[in-house]
Amino acid sequence: MRPFQYTRAQDVPTALKRREANPNAQFLAGGTNLLDLMKEDVERPDELIDISRLSLSQIKTIASGPNAGGVSIGGLGKNTDAANHPLVRQNYPLLSQAILAGASGQLRNMATNGGNLLQRTRCPYFYDVSMPCNKRAPGTGCGALEGINRMHAIFGWSEQCVAVYPSDMAVALAALDAVVKVQGAEGPERAIPFADFHRLPESTPEKDTNLNAGELITALELPKNQFAAHSYYLKVRDRASYAFALVSVAVGLELNKNRITRARIALGGVAHKPWRAYRAEELLVGKEATEVHFVAAAAAEMAEAKPLAHNGFKVELGRRSIVRALHMALNEGKS
Amino acid sequence: MMEENEAPQLTEDEKKLFEDLMPEDLDEILDTGVNRRHFLKLLTLTGGGLLAYQAAAAEQVLTRPLSLPPEALPPSTLENAVDLSLRINGTSQKLTVDSRMTLLDTLRERLGLTGSKKGCDHGQCGACTVLVDGRRVLSCLTLAASCEGQSVKTIEGIAQGNTLHPMQQAFLKHDGFQCGFCTPGQICSAVAVLDEAQKGEASYVTGPVRLKAGAKPSPVRLSEEEIRERMSGNLCRCGAYPNIVAAIREVQSGKPVEQTWNFVG
Ligand SMILES: Cc1cc2nc3c(=O)[nH]c(=O)nc-3n(C[C@H](O)[C@H](O)[C@H](O)COP(=O)(O)OP(=O)(O)OC[C@H]3O[C@@H](n4cnc5c(N)ncnc54)[C@H](O)[C@@H]3O)c2cc1C
Ligand code: FES
Ligand code: FES
C-alpha cells in the first residue's frame, strides 16, 4: 500500500473542507472496499479522511418534505443496523433482505450505507493493474469485452466497459425509489433520485455515479409505500452464501385482491447500475398476479438483453429469477 | 514448516503441564523427542469437558508470545505516524503506528497476539475475525488508526482466565477444526453469532424478515441452516464445517448435539 496521511474528521463541515483542499484525498467509511483496492494498488489516495465517527447514522421517520412519512437512513450507519432496524423491517423488509444477502456478518458490521452505494465493480480486469481497463485507467481498453466475461453485463454496456455493479443493497433501493441526499463543501444539500445516482458506462466508465468530487452521502430517503406485504429479494450466485450475484431480483408489489396495482422490479448482476425492469413493471400493472402474467413480463424484459460471449446463461437465469421472485413476493417470502 | 522430529525441547512450563496431564508418558516423550505442535495435538486429543481446566492452562502456556512483544520498537522514524490508544483484551495499549497498519498486522506484529490469522488479507476468508466494541469485524480491512478509543477482543481474550469459553469447549468436544488455522476466527465469529441471534438480528435465511407494525426483533433460534448462513464469512479449508455447526448448536441450545452431515444435493 502506498503511504497516505490519516485524518480523523470531527464534523461534517471539516470533513468537506479537508476533502475540498486535497483532490487526492478520499473519505474512509467502513474501509471494506477502499482498503482492499488500496492493497491492490487500484486506488491511490495520498490522504484518507476518516468519516466513520461523524454523527450521520440515525434511522428515523421523515417528518416533512416530499418523502414525509417515509424513513431516512444515515449515510454512515452500518449495513447491519440498517437491515435490523424495526422501522426498516416493518416498512421495507425488501431492503433488509437485500443487505443481508450481501457479503458476510463481519463485513456488514463494518460496511456503511453510503460506502455500500459507492463500492466499485468486482470485474477482475479492474482489480488487476497489469490488465487493460477503461474504468481504472481510461484509454487502455476493456479487457473483458473480448476476454473472460461470464460475470459481466447483459444490459446497458458499451464497447468501453462491460463491468457490472456489485451492490445488493442498491438493487433494493432502486426498486424502492430511494433518494440519495448529498452535501458538498459549498451550497445546500442535494437530493438525487436513485435512478439517476449510478451511471451506465457509455464513453466514461471511470465515472460510476453522478456524485460530484468531494460530495458526501449524508442520508438515504425511502418514500412511503405499501410494498412491505409483498416484496422479495432473490439472489442467485455460484455458492449458497458469501458470493456476489450472478443475477438478483428485487420485487415489490401492491395488490388489490389479486390484481397488481403497482409493481417495482430491479435486477442486480446484469448491468453497470441496478437495472430497473420498467418494461416488466408496465406489463404487470392492472393484471392478475398469476404465473402466466409473470412469465410474459419476465420474457419481455429479458428480450432486450445483449449477452456477451460467456454470459448467455444470464438471460434465461434472469427470466426465471424474475418469475420466481414475483411468486415469492406474492406469498410474502414463503416458498 | 517444522519437521516432526525437530525442536524436541519443551519449556519448563510445558513439561510441568504435560506431567500433570499424562505423568506416565512424560519420560518416554522426553526421550524420544516431542515438539510443541505434537504437544498441542496431544492436548487437543485430551480436551473436552473433563480436561477443560488443564487445557485452558495449556493454552495460557502455549499462546504466550515466544519473544516479548516489541513495544520497544522505535516509532520515531515512521512516515505518517498515528498515535493510538485502545483497549486490547481488557488492557490499555498506547502505540504509534504507520497509518497503513491494519488492526491485524498491529495485533500480530506489534503486540505479539498471533492468534488472529492472516488468511487472504482481502476480507474473503474470516481468519482475521476479532470483536471491536463487541461486534465481529475483519481486522485485515480495519486500519489500526481508526480503532482509537475502541475495545478489541481477540481469541486470546475469549477465555475467562483459565476457564475456556463455552464455545472453545464445544469446538474441542466436537473437533471443530483440523489444522486449526481458521479456528480463532471461527470461534470469535461464533461467539458474536450467539449475541446477534439473541438480539434478534435477522439473516438472509430467517423466514420473512418483516416485522409487524410496532414489533421489535425477538431472539432467533439457530437452526443448522441459520448457522451455516451466519458463519459463511468464515471459510475452513479443512472442511470442518459439520463439526463447527454442531459446536455452535450445542452452545446455543445448552443440550448435547449429535453431528449431522450429508452431501450437498
Ligand atoms: C469478500 C467481500 C465480499 C463482499 N460481498 C458483497 C456482496 O455479496 N454484496 C454486496 O453488495 N457487497 C459485497 N461486498 C462489498 C461491501 O458491501 C462493500 O465493500 C461495502 O458496502 C462498502 O462500504 P464501506 O463503508 O466499507 O466503504 P469504504 O470502503 O469505506 O468506501 C467505499 C468508497 O465510498 C466512499 N465513501 C464511503 N462513504 C461515503 C460517504 N458517506 N460519502 C461519500 N463517499 C463515501 C469512499 O471514499 C470510497 O471511495 C463484499 C466485500 C468483500 C470484501
Ligand atoms: S485475512 Fe481477513 S478475511 Fe482473510
Ligand atoms: S481447520 Fe484447517 S482451515 Fe479450518
Image (cartoon, coloured by chain):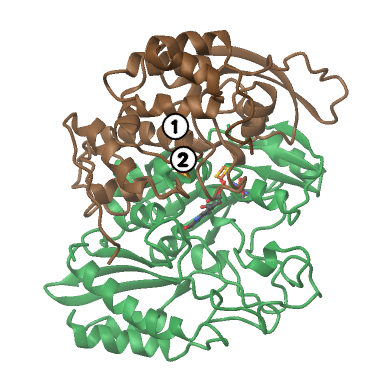
Residue at screen point 34% across, 43% down:
A84
* Label 1 secondary element: strand
Q: Which chain is brown?
A: B
Residue B135 disc label: 1
Q: Tell me the distance, in whole angstroms, between the alpha carbons under discs 1 and 2.
A: 7 Å
Quadrant position of ligand 2: top right
Residue A28, percent across and down? 65, 42
Residue at screen point 50% across, 43% down:
B126
Residue B150, percent across and down? 55, 22
In the rendered view, would you say B181 is above or below A156? above
Q: Chain of mark 1?
A: B
> In which quadrant of the rendered image does the N terminus of chain B lie?
top right
In the rendered view, would you say B153 is above or below A189? above
Residue A41, percent across and down? 76, 53
Residue B202 seen in this snapshot: no
Q: Which residue is mark 2?
A: A109
Which is nearer the eye, A69 or A211?
Answer: A211
Left or right: A216, with A38 as reference point:
left
State yes or no: discs 1 and 2 in contact (Cβ < 8 Å).
yes
Residue A228, percent across and down? 25, 58
